[in-house]
Image: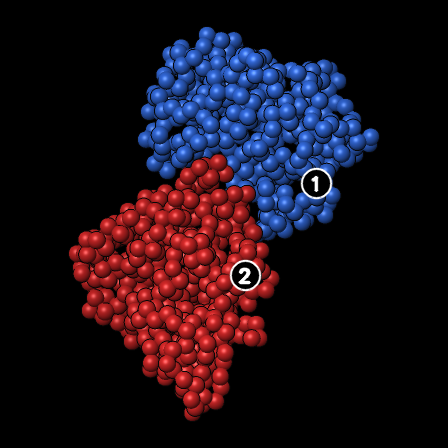
Amino acid sequence: MSTKSSDHDPYVRAEIAPPSGIAFPHKHLLGTWGLDPTTIQHLLDTADRYVDQNRRAKKTTAICAGLTQINLFFENSTRTLMSFEIAGKRLGMDTISMSTGTSSIKKGETLLDTAATLNAMHPDVLVMRHADSGAVKLLSEKMSCAVINAGDGRSEHPTQALLDALTIRRRKGRLHGQIIAISGDITHSRVARSNIYLLTAMGARVRLVAPPTLLPKDVDRLGVEVYTRMDEGLKDADVVMMLRLQQERMQGGFLPSLREYYQFWGLTRDKLAVAKEDVLVMHPGPMNRGVEIASDVADDFDRSAIEEQVEMGVAVRMACLDILTRNLREGGEA
Amino acid sequence: MSITAYTNARLMDPATGLDEIGTLTVEDGRIVAVGAAATTTGASHIVDCKGRVLAPGLVDMRAHQVDTDAAAAGGITTVILQPDQTTMIDTDAPVERIRRRAKDYSSVRVYPMGAATKGMRGEEIAEIGQMQEAGAVAFTDCRRAVANAQVLRRLLEYANYFGALIVQFPEESALAASGVAHEGEVATRLGLAGIPVMAEVIQIERDARLAEMTGSRLHFALISSAAGVEAVRAAKKRGAKVTAATAPHYLHLNENAVEGYRTFAKVSPPLRTEEDRKALIDGIKDGTIDVIVSDHDPRSEDVKRLPFAQAAAGISAFETLLPLALAPVHAGSLDLMTVLRAMTFTPAKLLGLSSGTLGVGANADLVIFDPAKPWRVDRSAFLSKARNTPFDTLPVQGRVWRTIVAGKPVYTGEPS
C-alpha cells in the first residue's frame, strides 16, 4: 500500500478486486477480529451497491433464489432479526426465523445437538445470536453451511461494525485517520469489540470513553486510546459512537444511578462541543434517551446518523449474505 | 515371604536426599533394604530397572475422582480425594464408605479430604474430629474459599486441637464473581468475564494472617499467579505456618490457551500470563510452593463442549502429571529431586501419611520411570474415565514404567 501521505487512504472507494479473486476467504463471518483490510473493503463496496438497490422502488432481486437462510436467535432482538430477514428476502432467499420465545428447540437441548438438527435441514446460511461469548463459533464448527454471527455474548457483532464502518465511510469519505470515540459500557459490549477490531484494522484512531467500572482490563492493548473523561475523549473527534447502557448495570454495582451516568457520560450538546464541527453521532440502538444520549443530539439532523445506520444495516447484511453464498450459486462468480 | 529386588535403579528418595544407583528390596509389602550396598541375596524375583529412576510413588494431594487405573498409569500410589463427591464428604459416614470401597476396589491408596464446613456452605464448622477418626486426612471446601473470616478463624483454632490440616481454595469469591478466565488482554478480547489476580492475593493475605493469629497450619490448594506466589512467600517469611500447591497446567500453559474458546483449557483458578507461569516455576524452585498436584477432574465431553462460560472447568490430569511436571526439569529450571519432593515426601508429611519415602520399613509404594523417554500425549489412549485434556498430541518426556503399591505392581508400562 502507498504510505506517501498520512492523509492517503488506500481503501477509499478504490473498488479494488479482492485478493486472488476470492471475495471472502473464510467460510463463516464470526467476527471482525482478524479480517484483513481488503476483505473489509470489498464487503463495504458490495454493501454500497446494495444501498442504491434498496432505495429503488423494486428492491428485490433473485440472485439468492432457492437458497435457505435460517435466523436462529437465542436472545431477544427485533431490529437485528428484522434486518437480516429483510436482507435475505431482498436477495430472493427463503428466510426462516426462530427465536427462543417462539421455538421449542431449546428444551434442554445442547447447542451442538441443535447444530446437528439444523444441519440436517440443509440451510445455506445460518444467522445466529446467543447470550454466551463464543457460542456462535462453537456451533459453526458443526455446520456445513456458512454461519453469520449476529451477536454472541459480549464477544462480537460483526455486521454491526460493518454497517457502522459503511455509515462513516459514506459520510466522511474514508475511515483511515478518522478519530472515532466509542463511549459507554465497553466491558459488556460486543458492538464495541467488533468496532475496535474493524476500525483499527482500517487505520482509524479509535478512542474509548467510559466510566472506569465499564472499561475491561488491558483494553488499551487492543490498539485504542482509553479515556474516562468525556471532554478529553471527545476532543476533536470526527465520530462519536454511543453504546446502549443496560439497566441491569446498576445492580452489578457498576454505576450508582442513571441520573449520575447521564450527568457525567451522557452525550449532550455541551459535551459534544469539544468534538469537530462536523462530528457524526452514532448509536447502534435501541437508544435510552436521557441516559446515554440527549434527545436533541440524537435528533440533530446534520450530525446524527442513527437512522442511516439502520438503513446501512440492511445493505451490509445483504452484502454478507451475497458474498458468503457465492460459491453455492450458479456460475460461481467470485 | 518372597523378596523382590529392584536392581540397577537410580534410587531417588526426597525424604533423605538419596540419589544413587543401587538396589531396593521389598518383602511383605515393605522396603527392607535400599542403596548401592543393598544386595539381591534371598530375592525370589529380580527386576532390572536398567538405570530408570526409582522413587516413592506419587502422592497426589488434589483429585476430584479416584479413577484408579489412570492414577496407577500416572505413577500415583496415593490419591487424596476432594470432598466434592456426588454425596458430599462432610460427615464421617462417607469418609468411611470411601475408605472401605478404596480397600476393596482400588489398586492405589485413597484418602479423602473432608469438607471444612457443613455442606461446604462456609457457615458452620464440619465434624472434623469424627471425619479424621474415620480416615479423612485434611479439610477443605474444595472449589470455594471459606469466605467468612470469623468462620475460618474458628475453623483454624478448632482444627489445631486435632492437628488437622485446613486447605483453603485461594479465591476471593466476590472479586472472582462470575469470571471464567484470567482478567487480562485475552479475556477482554474474547469477551469473557475475568477473574483478577487480586482475587487470589487477597484471599492468601487475609488467610495467612488468620493462620498467624491462630498459630494453625493452613495450606493453599492451588496457586496460579506471580502475585499469589509472592503473597505466600511473604507470609512464610513472617513465620506463618502456610504451605501452597500448584498444578502442572499452570506451569505449562498461559492465558493464550483459551484462545478460540477452548474449553479444555478452562480451569479454576484460570490460566494466567506468561510472567505468572514463570513465577510459579521459580516458586517451586525456592520452596515457596511446596506441592505439585494434578487437580485431576475427569469430565465428560457433554459438559465440556458448551459455550465457554457454561462449560465445566477441569482437566483429566493423572496421566500427564509426571511428564508435565518433568518439563521444567528438562528445560533446566528445576531439579528432579525438587519436583519429586513436591509430589511425594512433602504432601505425605503435610497430611501425616507415612508414604513418600524409600526408607527401610516404609510401605513399598513405588514408581519407576524413565525421565527422558519421549512420547506424545494421546488422549484416546487414556485409561481415565474422561479425556478432557488440553495436552492431546503434546510431545513430552518422561514415562512411567512400573507403579507398585505395597510391593504389588499395579501398572506395567512397556515390557522391559
Circle 2 crowding by C-alpha within 10 Å: few under 14, some 14–19, many from 20: few
Q: Position of residue B293 (x, y in %)?
A: 40, 61
As rendered, which of B54 and B248 lies closer to the eye?
B54
Q: Position of residue B285 (x, y in %)?
A: 34, 55
Quadrant of the rendered image containing residue B157: bottom left
Report which residue position mark 1 lands on.
A145
Q: Is residue B67 above or below residue B100?
A: above
Do the CB atoms of the residues marked 2 and 1 lie less than 8 Å apart?
no
Q: Is residue B49 above or below residue B397?
A: below
Please, what is the three-letter code of the amino acid marked with disc 1?
A: Cys
Q: Which of the chains bears the disc numbered 2?
A: B
Q: Which of the chains bears the disc numbered 1?
A: A
The chain letter of the blue chain reads: A
Locate the N terminus of chain A and report the quarter of the image it occupies: top right
Report which residue position mark 2 lands on.
B374
Q: Secondary structure at mark 2?
A: strand
**Which residue sits at x=28%, y=59%?**
B243
Q: Is residue A86 visible?
A: no
**Which residue sits at x=45%, y=84%?**
B4
Please, what is the three-letter code of the amino acid marked with disc 2?
A: Pro
**Which residue sits at x=67%, y=33%?**
A25
The chain letter of the red chain reads: B
Locate the C terminus of chain A and report the quarter of the image it occupies: top right
- In the rendered structure, the answer to whether residue B138 lies left or right of residue B412 reads left
Q: Position of residue B226 (x, y in %)?
A: 34, 47
Of labels 2 and 1, the one closer to you: 2
